[in-house]
Image (cartoon, grey):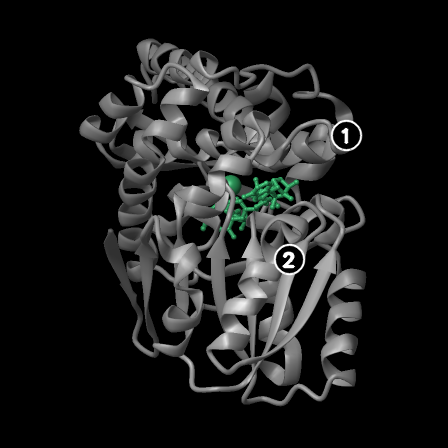
Amino acid sequence: MSTVHVSFDQKAYDVKINNTAHTQIGSEILAVWSLRKIALLTDSHVGPLYLTATQQQLEAAGFDVLPLQVPAGEQSKSLTVAGELIAKMAAAGFTRGDGLIALGGGVIGDLGGVVASLYMRGISFIQIATSLTAQVDSSVGGKTAVNLGNTKNIAGTFYQPDLVLVDSTYLDTLTDRDLVEGYGEVVKTSALDSQEFFDFTGTIQSTQDIRAHAQKLSQLAIAYKAKIVMHDEKESGQRQYLNFGHTIGHAIELLAHGNLRHGEAVAIGMIAMTERMAREDVSSDDLTNALKVRLEAVGLPTSSNLIGTPEFFDHLINDKKNRGGVLNLVALKKIGDPVIIQKKLADMPTFIK
Ligand SMILES: NC(=O)c1ccc[n+]([C@@H]2O[C@H](COP(=O)([O-])OP(=O)(O)OC[C@H]3O[C@@H](n4cnc5c(N)ncnc54)[C@H](O)[C@@H]3O)[C@@H](O)[C@H]2O)c1
Ligand SMILES: O=C(O)C(=O)C[C@@H](O)[C@H](O)[C@H](O)COP(=O)(O)O
Ligand SMILES: [Zn+2]
């Protein structure tokens, strides 16, 4: 078991990485929340597996629980679904003193965070991270978001939770594809962080290896992410590094209409960016290869013919690193050495070519 402490001027919380957390939910939540009503949000894959046991533990600890379940998948990250959840909580008499727990992966965390931050202008929020993406990235740092139409994460808030529980036991029921998707974000974080972490991802050769080392991967990835977000909660500077691979990744994730998972798109985005930054002498050629080896070892895709289509360029305008027609692109000079390179949107077709 280990704990990563995340603190800001106005708020602090623990990320508890503990493989027995799924059996201690009542006491873990009671340690940070006094008795109140809890909206327990999950999705249609995680719900049948873990909702009843989680609800029972919370009720045994004295909480009054409203279970809320949405269809699994990115489609649930919408304002419509968020509005429906807010209406259900209002109908159940939730007040500002109550709370919401997101029990699920990145979709449920991002959606739950939006609902918690909007309901009565903000109620308490906790994440129980059940997917690898959530355990290594999305549950920490307070970015919440929903998609609108065909635009990824276009509406959201920075809203920190009171507690994050990371228990790799949940990964036993995660499909290999969903596991590997999360591993894309691990490779990203290891490349941003240090040669030591990147060398460790070099030892991961299969999904079995990811599962065997999931707890260590969470510890390393969350320690890095916490360090970054504590210094730049609202992403005015170095937090942008966590978006390595995402400018291209988010555009192709949307263009693939559900056929590419987030972490798969990020994997493709990191390779596409590093190849092009090598052409401009920012990154080295061997960096592209080192990333590719790690991603392909576990079956992640590293190329896509969606890059460079007219629709692709249309999506870049919605990147949150676009400032008045100039994109802040995240590149790696070398492992552990990220840098922001500015490119005009108008110059992107030449850069991407
Ligand atoms: N807020 C952030 O900082 C941040 C960071 C990274 C990704 N994200 C977002 O997270 C989302 C991707 O996250 P994700 O990969 O967790 O997606 P997800 O939440 O859709 O989970 C992937 C699939 O795994 C299922 N699942 C989750 N836990 C399970 C378990 N223990 N057993 C069985 N099935 C389980 C889900 O039902 C879903 O079908 C994207 O929307 C992405 O934009 C946000
Ligand atoms: O926490 C962050 O900051 C990140 O950028 C983490 C990313 O992995 C994540 O996908 C995030 O949701 C992307 O945010 P966006 O601001 O580009 O929508
Ligand atoms: Zn991401």
- Residue 23, by quadrant, is bottom left
Q: Which is more toward the observer, 314 or 66?
A: 66
Q: Residue 168's spot in the image, x, y percent?
A: 40, 43
**On screen, residue 287 above or below 317:** above
Question: What amino acid type is highlighted by mark number 1?
Answer: Glu
Which element type, helix, strand or loop, lies under badge 1?
helix
Q: Which mark is residue 311?
A: 1
Q: Which is more toward the observer, 221 or 43?
A: 43
* Residue at x 42%, y 43% (from the top left corner): 169
**On screen, residue 60 above or below 40:** below
Q: Residue 206's spot in the image, x, y percent?
A: 42, 16
Q: Is residue 8 visible?
A: yes
Q: Which mark is residue 42?
A: 2
- Residue 259, by quadrant, is top right
- Residue 199, by quadrant, is top left
* Residue at x 47%, y 13% (from the top left corner): 296
Q: Which is more toward the observer, 2 or 196?
A: 2
